[in-house]
Image (tube, helix red, strand yellow):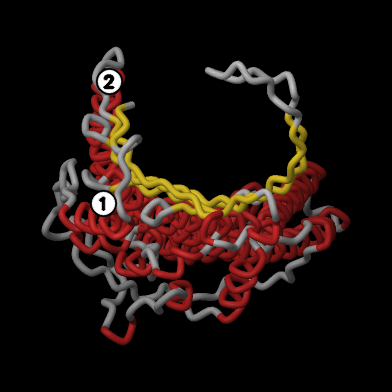
Amino acid sequence: MRSLGSSKKFNLSGLLLVGILSATLGCTVGPAYKRPSAEVPNTWKGEGPWQTATPKDSIPKGTWWEVFHDPILDQLEQQLIDANQSLTAARDRLSEARSQARIASAALFPSVSTDPSAQRQRLSGDRPLSGSSVAASPVTQNVYSIPFSVNYELDVFGRVRKTLQAANVSLQATAAELENSRLVLTAELAADYYSLRELDREARVVRQSVEIQQKGMDLVNRRHEGGVANGLEVAQQAAVLDATATQLQLVLRQRAQYEHAIAVLLGKPASTFNFPEAPLEVKLPAIPMGVPSEILERRPDVAASERQMAYENAQVGIAMTAFYPHITLGGSGGLQSRDIASLASAPSLFWSLGSDLLQPVINGGRNRANLALTRAAYDESVANYRESVLVAFQQVEDGLSGLALLDQATKTQQAAVEDSRRALNIANERYTGGVTTYLDVISAQTTLLTNERLATQLLGQQMTTAVYLVKALGGSWDFSELQREQVRPSAIQAVQQ
């Protein structure tokens, strides 16, 4: 380290003037950040078959799930916001990032420290004395000292400012990750909720099939007792009835798993959480689509990826400042006296002012390697950003095509249910008329149950696909919300610990 002013004193006003001019005129090395381009389509490929959204159907700000107009879902989502532990952890990470940014901003201000001391000491009478042949005398004395030291790095080349910039964009990336966690968790809750409701409706369908098949069982038993039906028909109907009862238990098992998953999302023990059955009775909402370019501003995961690019860009700038001098202003002073009564007097005052300049010369290529590392990390973040954009468009298109195909499947499947009901009625009439065997009735019962369950499952898939489409669109979030997440230095920091 080269010391400037170690033997030469500067007056305090001159030192402050140097600091102010250096901070004002200092440059910032490193590349300016500009968001890299990403391929964005002009329009969506898929077109939904549902009703077109109008301006009044816009996704509610901060509560995207309200677009489904389901009061029970609204209550569940609010419980999740208040009590979900993963979301609480994400909020804590945001607080950590905010504190890290405040720590980085502290480097913009001088650091002042003091170390008061009071001691009584005895100096040896045999202590060595340089250049004197006179014997020393033992000395006993008090030493009172109140020293102060001041250090301040002149941010001539922007290292401190780049560090604060990196901390701020990291803070914004963490804020975007919090919003992405909120979006993912609320979407998961909505999907689990509609899956559970679909299973409630499916359980009702299976129970109705059990009732139908039980009536068939009673009919076959009566005919068997009357000598019209044979034992094979009784056994066949009993097998179908038992198999359907088994299906009901499997449906209820799936429902229990979704109920437990919802409990965890709400921050509640699964053992104490119970959700009453209520079959799914909903209508697909109108979903405002917007244009593809809006995805870059509405998706919090894409925003987090973009902020990561800005962070890596700032790291490149920080690495470049390592090639330039680091200049530090320093000073020390205070009061020192053998007598506490004279400690506050002018003769007890001592001080010194100076500056240090540290210029790397040779360090084995460490700085060059570090700069290459940060540039590679930036290039990686650009690729990750562009990949996140592509995935975002894929997820939206998946939702659009999924809803379109599910709409067609729902229509044809509903027709299949109606056909199956007619087939069952015809089979029963033909059997009681003695035209066919009971095997036709059993086949019609099985077909009807299968088609009714599939129709119910398709409705559930439509609702969960709509949930994930809203999620793919970014919910109700907007990139502009990140702008308030920024730590700005304030004058009060100059006197804070």
Whether residue 449 sits left or right of residue 291 in the image: it is: right
Can you see residue 362? yes
Question: Of callouts 1 and 2, which one flags the residue occurring earlier in the amino acid sequence?
Answer: 2
From the image, which quarter does the N terminus lie in?
top left
Q: Residue pushed farthest right?
A: 225
Q: Residue pushed farthest bottom?
A: 56
The disc placed on residue 490 is none
- Circle 2 residues within 10 Å: few <14, some 14–19, many ≥20: few
From the image, which quarter does the C terminus lie in?
bottom right
Whether residue 336 sits left or right of residue 162 in the image: it is: right
x 39%, y 68%: residue: 490
User: Foreground residue, 282 or 189?
Assistant: 189
User: Foreground residue, 69 or 377?
Assistant: 377
x 79%, y 44%: residue: 235
Residue 139 placement: quadrant: top right
Return the residue at label 1: 393
